[in-house]
Image: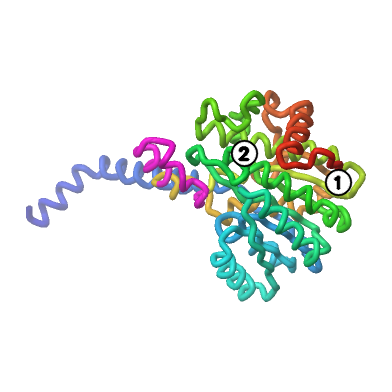
Amino acid sequence: MSWPEVVKWFDQNKIVLIAVTCSVVGAGGFLVGLRVWLQGPSCKSKARLDGKTVIITGSNTGIGKETARDLSRRGARVVMLCRDLQKAKVTAEEIHQETGNTVGIYQLDLASLESIRNTANTLKDTEPNIHILINNAGVMMCPRWETKDGFEMQLGTNHLGHFLLTLLLLDQIKASAPARIITVSSIAHTQGRMHWEDLQMKERYEAKEAYCQSKLANVLFSRELSRQLQGTGVTTYSLHPGVVQTELGRHIHQSVNGFIHWAFHFFGNFFFKTVVRGAQTTIHCAVEESLATTSGKYYSDCAEKQPHPLRVCDDDARRLWDTSLQLVGLDHYSA
């Protein structure tokens, strides 16, 4: 095709070309705008944490790492409780080099009550003040594994492990009041129910159902813990960080078909929150000044939200508290 013919073709089809170009640009703009919107808001508080100690579980990667980084920037002494000490050391050094603040590291396996007790005993000697505890670590949709104590892995790690750790550190937290306890839950709690007749799901296991139960347990625990701590100056918060592209979904391929697993990660790269944005609601609950006298509430996108009214009730919260005490061997404990 000669140049004059090319010019003539473009002239004859310019309306179609303009329409196609506008459609492509419009679609691209829409997708970019959608991605920005899905990232959600950032924590607006500029509060400093100089002289404060913050303990975070599972903080060597994902939103836990970004939470640790942000709170260290604010002057806090961050203490990382992680299962993999080598990865934790790399992260701690990275944060120290960036912020100039010391970062503590302790080994913790939330799937072992013995490990939790050993770590808590160590912390009693080394960390007399705990101003903020962030129960962040977790597992998601794994096969039916069991913890070292025979608990279903997701309930045992996501709830029971953090339950025991929190109660064993409670004296230090109360002595440091005003203090905060933050538990990372999920919107998945809205699809969960407590299987009181079979909490460990031995009779019928479904990975997603077990995950939703554990996230509901997080919300119920935070709610009852708030009631137990009234008048102590310690406030509690549970939250949904958003749908975040982290290592948390690493077991999904073992619970779903290949296409769903591929789609989860492919679309996740574009539509899911980054780890920085995924950490924002945790950070908000840790530092936002207006939350200082608020306790037991549930948050998402840096704002208070209502948990599922049919899933979250005070009776279930109290029942879970009593059941959890028995399961972790603290039958006579009182907050």
Residue 209 appears left or right of 105: left
Please tell me which residue is depicted at 52% across the width and 26% down the height of the picture: 204
Instruction: Residue at the far left: name it.
Output: 1
Please tell me which residue is depicted at 60% across the width and 73% down the height of the picture: 93
How far is mark 2 from mark 1, CA to CA?
Answer: 30 Å
Q: Can see residue 216?
A: yes
Query: At numbered mark 1, what does the secondary structure look like: helix, strand or loop?
Result: loop
- Which quadrant holds residue 186? top right
Q: Nearer the viewer, residue 331 or 136?
A: 331
Q: Amino acid at mark 1?
A: Thr
- Which quadrant holds residue 70? bottom right
10 Å neighbourhood of mark 2: few (<14), some, or many (≥20)?
many
Q: Nearer the viewer, residue 158 or 20?
A: 158
Magenta-highlighted residues = 245-265
Q: What x and y, as percent, mark residue 51?
A: 81, 68
* Residue 39 higher or lower than 321, as above or below: below
Circle number at residue 293: 1
Q: In the image, is residue 327 part of the stretch drawn in magenta?
A: no
* Residue 100 higher or lower than 45, as above or below: below
Q: In the image, is residue 256 part of the stretch drawn in magenta?
A: yes
Q: What x and y, as percent, mark residue 251?
A: 46, 44
- Residue identified by numbered label 2: 155
